[in-house]
Amino acid sequence: MSSELLLDLKDVSVAFGGGIGSKAPFVALENLNLSIASNRPEIVAVAGESGSGKTTLGRVVLGLLQPTAGSVAFEGADVWHSGAARTKSFRRAVQAVFQDPFSVFNPFYPVDHLLRGPLEAFGIARDRATQLELMTSALRQVGLKPDQVFGRYPHQLSGGQRQRIVVARALMLRPKLIVADEPVSMIDASLRANVLTNLAALRDEHGISIIYITHDLATARQVSDRLFVLYRGRAVEVGAASDVIGSPKHPYTQLLMSSIPRPDPENPWPALSGVKGEIGTSDRRACVFVDRCPHRMPICATQPRLMETDPGRHVACHLYAPPGDTGHESAPLKMQVHEG
Amino acid sequence: MSGPLLEIRDLSVSYRLGQLQARAVDGLSLTLERGERLGIVGESGSGKSTLALALMRLHKPPAMIESGEVKLGGTDILRLSKEELRRFRWSEISLIPQGAMNSLNPVLRVRQQMADTIRAHRRDLGGKQIRRRIDELLQRVGLDAKVAELYPHELSGGMKQRVCIALAIVLEPKLIIADEPTSALDVVVQRTVIETLKDVQAQIGAALIMIGHDMGLMAQSVDHLAVMYAGRLVDVAPIKAFFTRPLHPYSQMLISSLPSPDETKPLAGIPGMQPSLTDLPSGCAFNPRCPVAQPVCRELVPALLELEPRRRAACHVAAEAYHVV
């Protein structure tokens, strides 16, 4: 039953542009399905290179962007049809942690301001004593000493500390879901572990599910339960994070894994097997990876659907089509435009 | 000529902020051999980008070079006149700045920008020769000659970065400094760009200083690694030795804090944070975060000592283990 799902994205597509007389629309996300159960909090990593649609996906989940096609349901209610996307309760239940911990703070206010703001906006606590209590406990939970934070200005704190304050801020609102878009990519390596450990604690101790958007498969492996690999707007491989990263099946996931520079001079990059190149073809009837794929076949001129290869493991690649199954996507992509 | 290509001796660069003074590069000494690749890593604010700019005297106030020597092939860059410096830059030493791909002029075609650079330094070349040189350079960095007729916005990030590499080798310098050359690129493109950079550097026989924070990338790219912390060099080692047996506690913790894509293991960070350059702790700047700190570490700044051939570390504890005091 759908009410058991915290989040349910069905066939979500997002296209930009493409009005009358202009060029073909740019497809940022195509037929994406992603659901998270209410009773089983998890960290779902969404990985891909720039232009893969991972940030678009985050904005759809946050209710900041209405998909061109498909539906987004939160706790069983369609957020756009029911108007939930604009309600305070939805805004409170789904929180965001963004990439840049330097631009979310107003440099003219002490950082308390960022913590107190949502308490007042959502009417959680209006008197100073209660506010202080909530702020103190949230800061403690992300491993910060409140007296190191209160009264300080953003420039006096490290990127890691700032990002943990953003996490503490989200935590105070008792959200059910957090979208963390590249939360550690701008933080020094030595401080990343703290922020990621905080995110894992939100899941384990507070039952909060997290969508962890990243380009870094190494951290995705360490903190996430499930992994979606996106390429040019499509999910090309989905499964348990350790399985997908440990034994990637899709040629794109394999290319990503072999390109990660290992911190081991004795273990150099393996020879490139694929076709050299960067994001290229614009023909969306073909497999999105066809122009870079070393295993290209005639059938790859058609878009493969996500096929289950093992329980919980899906790969969108004709190499894994079961015998007798063409692996084609059944229905052609429909784009409908919602009335504004 | 004998001797190292680059000799940096006791270089100090500071920023003046009113009454405060922050020494972003503090008494740094380094040598680099011809054709060698050196990586410099450090957290943000450790002084690595300031060092890169100071080596070319491209730093701007409030940064100023307090003291030191930067000798490239025997010439002290810090003593050159403005005109000498202008000729020296790019022909002897070139820089691929951080976010280089955004440094391309958006209203000029690639050919025009490359031709300007060549013309500024090689008045002897005619239009045809310049044209041929540009085509050859683009080919060297793995780009089609057609790219020369495009504007920067028509290129992908990786292609723009290749154009910047081509610009850096226009005059076949003896030293290329690359500051975070792939920081905004995806892993797949990052790899091809780094391999291109290494290829052209080897072809023209230049030395390379690569500045960054990605330890994995360094392991794949350089021969020697230097670690900076709070403006000082704390560890210098051949790359293999650095990863198999790091001598400085900071290096040890940096390596163990790297998340691995190949196994699931608990995340380990380094507690605390890098001190502010205007408020350094007494003694070793790393002592508040160091798990093996001794009383002496809170009193004396450790010197960068040669503990093994071509391996230096600035750590009292490591020095004691080597009976060097």
Image (tube, coloured by chain):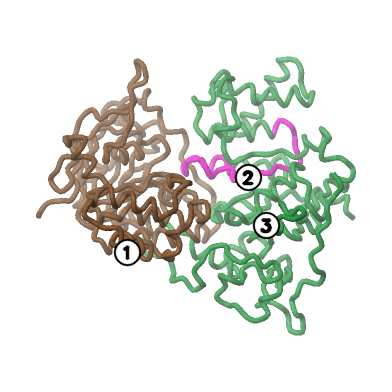
Chain colours: A green, B brown
Q: Residues within 10 Å of mark 2 (few under 14, many from 20)?
A: many
On whether disc 1 and disc 2 are found on a single subunit, the reply is: no
Looking at the image, residue A319 sits to the left or right of residue B238; the answer is: right
CA distance separating discs 1 and 2: 45 Å
Which residue is disc 2 drawn over?
A: A181
Distance between the Cα atoms at labels 3 and 2?
A: 16 Å
Q: Position of residue B298 (x, y in %)?
A: 32, 27
Q: How many labels sit on residues?
A: 3
- Which amino acid type is shown beneath numbered disc 1? Arg
Viewer-proximal residue among B108 and B45:
B108
Q: Residues within 10 Å of mark 3 (few under 14, many from 20)?
A: many
Residue holding disc 3:
A226
Which residue is the site of mark 1?
A: B132
Q: Mark 1 or mark 3, which is nearer to you?
A: 1
Residue at x-position 21% and y-position 54%? B124
- Chain at numbered mark 2: A
